Amino acid sequence: MELTVLNETQSESGGGCSSSSCGSSNDQLGHLPDAIKEKVHNHPCYSEEAHHYFARMHVAVAPACNIQCHYCNRKYDCANESRPGVVSELLTPDQAVKKTKAVAATIPQMTVLGIAGPGDPLANPERTFETFRRLSAEAPDIKLCVSTNGLALPDAVEELAQHNIDHVTITINCVDPEIGAKIYPWIFWNNRRIRGKKAAKILIEQQQKGLEMLVERGILVKVNSVMIPGVNDDHLKEVSRIVKQKGAFLHNVMPLIAEAEHGTFYGVMGQRGPSNEELMELQDECAGDMNMMRHCRQCRADAVGLLGEDRGDEFTIDKIEEMEIDYDEAMKKRAVIHQGIAEELAEKEKKRAALAAVKVPSGPSVENTNFRPVMMAVATSGGGMINQHFGHATEFLIYEASSQGVRFIQHRKVDQYCIGNDTCGEKESALAGSIRSLSGCEVVLCSKIGFEPWGLLEEAGIQPNGEHAMEPIEEAIIAVYEEMIATGKLDESRVSDTQMSA
């Protein structure tokens, strides 16, 4: 049996996301111009691999919104929540440009500037496009992106194209007005508020029209969908089918955030969010029709840094006003850093090709046999490496190893178990929560792990592993999976070829 890492040049059968990427395989990029292909490799939202190396930032210049969603409650001057619609500071276009330059000079791995709120960028066209116009001229090495609910999108497509905005995200939660009426209480359209099915029908038509117009212009479109159990969860498979048919590049099915303390309608009314298992199952079902993004962190509207981290506190308005930025010099430094990352990724690709030739132990006991997949959790602080202590993790990346290779499944947030002292609050509760979050995983890979969590993980049927510290994630997962096969740990769980293809 040959075990490989599926990557951006290898896709699973038929449709769906290539195993270790978000769907940016050569086949899926084949119909796009070379210039667009080039813009995917270092975009952390459009490439699962890129998010380990490249950072993004959002600038909050768009306060107004033209629709109301039952899952949204925009909050200002808030540093304690991490979800879309939340910001600590609202910026003017001038402040946004200065902040972007400051971040790009300080974090040279930052490649993408997005406007995603806290309202809808296209409901604030003057502020949004003034920011884009300035950045196009003053920071030409930064990709520009916009996220929108799509209501005003058709009228904005031409201007988006003029500013070389090659990545647009549209939040599409339904294509059925009956379902839409359960998600959107109203829209503001042609200077009046419209409610119910009529409002949902207008929104859906505008979203689909905008999607088609963007695709016609060669602009990459990512579709975000919020999974709301009992409302649109089954329906999202149809959404995925339709947006793929119309040319969307990527589909991101996100879990509903519905804690009551956020003050959303769904939160107050007790609407639950999906479990990790429910989200994974739906993403897998949609993957048959659409390339799936599985590494989304549902960022704040002012997020800064790698996905999964937020360095916004380093770049508040008062701090950036004191900074002197030589952006011409910063661009030179950024170019060197980006070239270094490109070389590292090229070397990683060579290693993947070498891994494709690695075979598991052969012999009558394993030849022509398929083994069940194994889910493994990884603690990482970035760079595609196993480089984080179990107790320091605030999230785990979940991968699946199988006879076909390694694929990224999802990330699962946890409360940090250890912050460096014996009195850190709720340690036992945090540890128990971390173990619960790893449900379904058989192995957790980390750089180090303490005696107490080691024992409790084993009791929960999860094997801790610190033997692959500072190794690339995919290589370590392959090594562990091959070891599990070689030592007979999967002998009782073999499945036939018929079962595998069923």
Image (cartoon, helix red, strand yellow):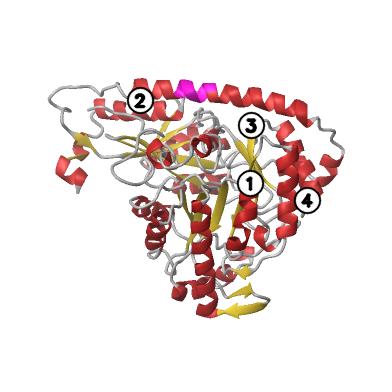
Q: Is residue 138 left or right of residue 273?
A: right
Q: Is residue 270 left or right of residue 143?
A: left
Residue bearing the label numbered 3: 109
Magenta stretch: includes residue 63: no
Residue bearing the label numbered 1: 425
Q: CA distance from mark 2 to mark 3?
A: 30 Å
Q: Is residue 149 left or right of residue 351?
A: right
Residue occupying image coordinates x 49% and y 52%: 215
Q: Quadrant of residue 170?
A: bottom right
- How many neighbours does mark 1 have within 10 angstroms: few (below 14), some (14-19), or many (20 or more)? few
Residue bearing the label numbered 4: 93
Q: Mark 3 falls on what kind of element?
A: loop
Majority secondary structure in the magenta region:
helix
Query: Can the viewer see residue 447?
Result: yes
Residue occupying image coordinates x 47% and y 64%: 228
Looking at the picture, how far across and down is residue 277, in whole percent?
39, 53
Q: Which of label 1 and label 4 is nearer to you? A: 4
Q: CA distance from mark 3 to mark 1?
A: 34 Å
